[in-house]
Amino acid sequence: MNKSVKTVLLVVGLGLLGYGIYTLVAPEAAVSIGELSIEAQDNTNSYITIALGIVALALGFLGGKK
């Protein structure tokens, strides 16, 4: 595998992993009325993003070694 392709895979993998972790931690919607605060979160897309980031990192590190 070409060195530039490996570098792109590593950068994309790190970006996807960081974005997935951010969306996992940050609340999606919040409603605040006086002292009452309600937060809702749907994490299914963030798990998929994290998995794609891990796959891209693995391909960047292990791709093309013989």
Image (cartoon, grey):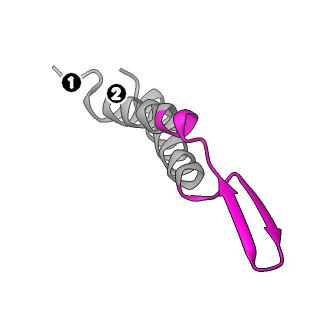
Could you tell me the amino acid type at mark 1? Lys
Determine the image quadrant of residue 46. top right
Q: Residue at x 76, y 80 (%)?
A: 35
Q: Secondary structure at mark 2?
A: helix
Q: Nearer the viewer, mark 2 or mark 1?
A: 2
Could you tell me the amino acid type at mark 2? Leu
Crowding around mark 1 (Cα neighbors within 10 Å: few <14, some 14 to 19, many 20+) is: few
Residue 55 lies in magenta, yes or no? no
What's drawn in magenta, residue-wise? 25-47
Q: Residue at x 45, y 38 (%)?
A: 7
Residue 59, numbered circle: 2
Residue 60, how many percent across, how many down?
36, 32
Q: Residue furthest bottom?
A: 35
* Nearer to us in this view, 37 or 47: 37
Q: Residue at x 53, y 45 (%)?
A: 20
* Nearer to us in this view, 25 or 38: 38
Q: Secondary structure at mark 1?
A: loop
Residue 35 lies in magenta, yes or no? yes
Judge left or right: residue 46 versus residue 66. Answer: right
How many tags in the picture?
2
The residue to which callout 1 is attached is: 65
Marks 2 and 1 sit apart, C-alpha to C-alpha, by 10 Å
Residue 48, how many percent across, how many down?
49, 31
Q: Residue furthest left?
A: 66
Q: Residue at x 57, y 34 (%)?
A: 45
Residue 62, how many percent across, how many down?
25, 29
Judge left or right: residue 3 versus residue 24. Answer: left
Which sits earlier in the primary sequence, circle 2 or circle 1?
2
* Nearer to us in this view, 56 or 50: 50
Determine the image quadrant of residue 66. top left
